[in-house]
Image (cartoon, rainbow, N blue to C red):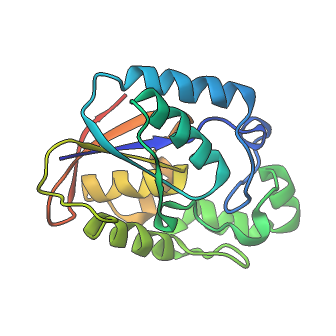
């Protein structure tokens, strides 16, 4: 079985370079267009179910893709939610640098040991994602077909690290673009193996 992870369509905060985290904002017009394009691109895939983070930007993307795939209704799973950036949510990197210069340096130099002020650590987010991979909602991982899950940059980066057996310290080295597909082989054990990024 393949797991196709999709980062939600662009939001205004993406375009402004703001940390989004758990802030529940809509996708921008270009994000809607991206979601429709992804739905068309996936029409040849054997997608049997669509899962999504419950945040609006992901759920809106998932709904448009599910509609393009013949009306598959997305199922929300909170384990696909973005990392909680706490007090950094809604701020640009420059604003964070002005308020938390030492913390920002720590985040960039040792992300595996960092906890966002008032938010999560990468370890917290990894635990959530691992639980999802081992026990997805109502799924038999030995069945055929592809599962499409709309999520966020953080969980998708973590999935890439899991699939490539890389340490959390390399989190910031994994590039994840809005509206992009990341395909993995998904085994019954919950293990991932990267198939392709496109």
Marks counted in the figure total 0
From the viewer's side, name the closer residue of 64 and 121. 64
Position of residue 137 measured from the top left corner of the image (x, y, whole percent): 34, 65
User: Which residue sits at x=51%, y=70%?
Assistant: 122
Q: Quadrant of the C terminus?
A: top left
Looking at the image, the residue that sits furthest to the left is: 142
Position of residue 161 measured from the top left corner of the image (x, y, whole percent): 35, 56
Quadrant of the rendered structure where residue 165 is?
bottom left
109 displayed left or right of 157: right
Quadrant of the rendered structure where residue 20 is?
bottom right
From the viewer's side, name the closer residue of 196 and 41. 41
Position of residue 43 measured from the top left corner of the image (x, y, whole percent): 35, 23
Q: Is 5 located above or below residue 124 in the figure?
A: above
From the viewer's side, name the closer residue of 170 and 15. 15
User: Which residue sits at x=73%, y=56%?
Assistant: 24
User: Which residue sits at x=41%, y=65%?
Assistant: 168
38 displayed left or right of 145: right
From the viewer's side, name the closer residue of 165 and 152. 152
7 displayed left or right of 11: left
Position of residue 41 measured from the top left corner of the image (x, y, whole percent): 40, 21
User: Which residue sits at x=40%, y=66%?
Assistant: 129
Looking at the image, the residue that sits furthest to the front is: 71
């Amino acid at each position: 079985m393949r797991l196709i992870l999709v980062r939600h369509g662009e939001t205004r905060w993406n375009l402004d370079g703001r940390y989004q985290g758990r802030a529940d904002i809509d996708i921008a017009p270009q994000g809607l267009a991206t979601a429709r394009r992804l739905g068309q691109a996936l029409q040849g895939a054997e997608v049997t179910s669509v899962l999504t983070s419950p945040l609006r930007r992901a759920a809106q993307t998932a709904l448009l893709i599910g509609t393009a795939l013949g009306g598959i209704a997305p199922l929300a799973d909170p384990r696909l939610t973005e990392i909680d950036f706490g007090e950094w949510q809604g701020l640009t990197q420059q604003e964070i640098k002005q308020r938390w210069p030492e913390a920002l340096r720590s985040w960039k130099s040792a992300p595996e040991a960092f906890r966002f002020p008032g938010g999560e650590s990468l370890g917290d987010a990894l635990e959530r994602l691992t639980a999802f991979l081992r026990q997805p909602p109502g799924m038999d991982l030995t069945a055929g077909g592809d599962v499409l899950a709309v999520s966020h940059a953080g969980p998708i980066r973590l999935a890439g690290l899991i699939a490539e057996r890389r340490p959390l310290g390399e989190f910031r080295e994994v590039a994840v673009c809005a509206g992009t597909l990341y395909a993995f082989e998904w085994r019954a054990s919950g293990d991932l193996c990267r198939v392709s990024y496109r």
